Amino acid sequence: MKVQQQSLLFLHSAVLLFGGTALFSKLIGLPALDITVYRTGVAAVVLFILLTLQKKSITLTSAKDYGVAILLGVVVGIHWVTYFSGMQMAGITVGIIAFFTYPVITVFLEPLLSRAKVKSMPQAKDIIIAFVVLLGIFLLIPEIDLGNQTTLGIVTGVISAFFFALRNVLHKNYFSHYSGPHTMLYQTLVAFVMLALFVEVPPSQVTTDDWLLILLVGIIFTAMPHALFASSLRHLSATTAGLISCLQPLYGSVLAFLLLNERVDILTIIGGLLVISAALFETWSVSKGR
């Protein structure tokens, strides 16, 4: 299997698991920040154990890399808090759609931060796909009353999208020489340390059911998919990764309907088809090396 095809496999596996992550914003009875702290703490421990068992190096090679790791951890920590907050305020389907403005943000953000600015300028294909995705997302959003929780949730979701796009581009250009698990160990650890002081519900007051869900989201839905996602960025552009990840709203919406009875309408279906079509085209394009 070619490295680019392997990266696509990693990416699609990560997106499938990401699709279920949003459910925990409703299933776990804690504030978004608390969910993020416990989730990142569990993920950091799991990744540390994994790297230790594999006898992989834990340290980084330079002081500059430690600085980049801290920056990435801060960015991803803000992303996760706003991600869960958006879901809690707007609902999973609307929240995840708002978050998925990030592929569009990535298309225009990547050239600004890329080391190879000329080579990484958006191609016409990427811009067209980004607008198709944006149209699909627009159709998915239900009628909104300005000033209510749903509107605030959408704004929060877009903020989360910006920080996720920023993390991906920074990682691709300044930290992709490390493995996925190595990268995510530092990002989850920094996010945990940064946010731990602001926890509202101490560990002793978290219910047994919530702890089981936290372990599940921390191990299966955080450590594993983020490591896979980070690994995929070693051979794929952040723009490609962002556009392919547009399958996530489909997974999240279907799971929200099946498990939480969140309904969808015809515009949601049409918008979802646009998003999925764009993601599939990008996958085909990368596979063919175009």
Image (cartoon, rainbow, N blue to C red):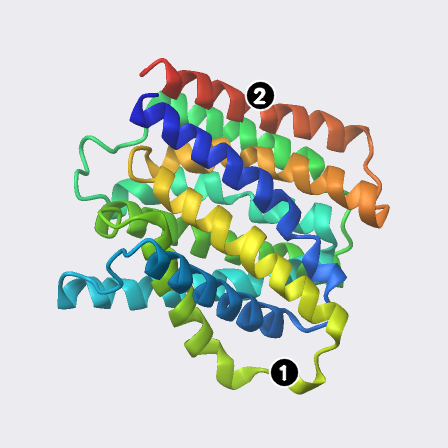
Considering depth in this image, is 69 or 224 the residue closer to the camera? 224
Q: Residues within 10 Å of mark 2 (few under 14, many from 20)?
A: some
Q: Position of residue 82 (x, y in %)?
A: 56, 63
Q: Quadrant of the N terminus?
A: top left
Q: Residues within 10 Å of mark 1 (few under 14, many from 20)?
A: few
Among all residues in the image, which is located at the extreme left?
62
Q: Earlier in the sequence, mark 2 or mark 1?
A: 1
For the question of whether residue 234 can be seen, the reply is yes
Q: Are marks 2 and 1 in contact (CB under 8 Å)?
A: no
Which residue is disc 2 drawn over?
277
Q: Quadrant of residue 190?
A: bottom left
Residue drawn at (45%, 67%), measured in percent from left and top? 45
Horizontal arrangement in the rendering, residue 150 relative to residue 219 (left or right):
right
For the question of whether residue 83 can be seen, the reply is no
Horizontal arrangement in the rendering, residue 2 relative to residue 245 (left or right):
left
Residue drawn at (61%, 69%), measured in percent from left and top? 35
In the picture, the disc for residue 16 is none
SS for tag 1?
Answer: helix
Residue drawn at (65%, 47%), measured in percent from left and top? 20
Which residue is disc 1 drawn over?
203
SS for tag 2?
Answer: helix
Q: Amino acid at mark 1?
A: Pro
Horizontal arrangement in the rendering, residue 257 relative to residue 63 (left or right):
right
Residue drawn at (75%, 37%), measured in percent from left and top? 254
Q: Position of residue 36 (x, y in %)?
A: 56, 68
Q: Quadrant of the C terminus?
A: top left
Q: Position of residue 51 (x, y in %)?
A: 34, 57
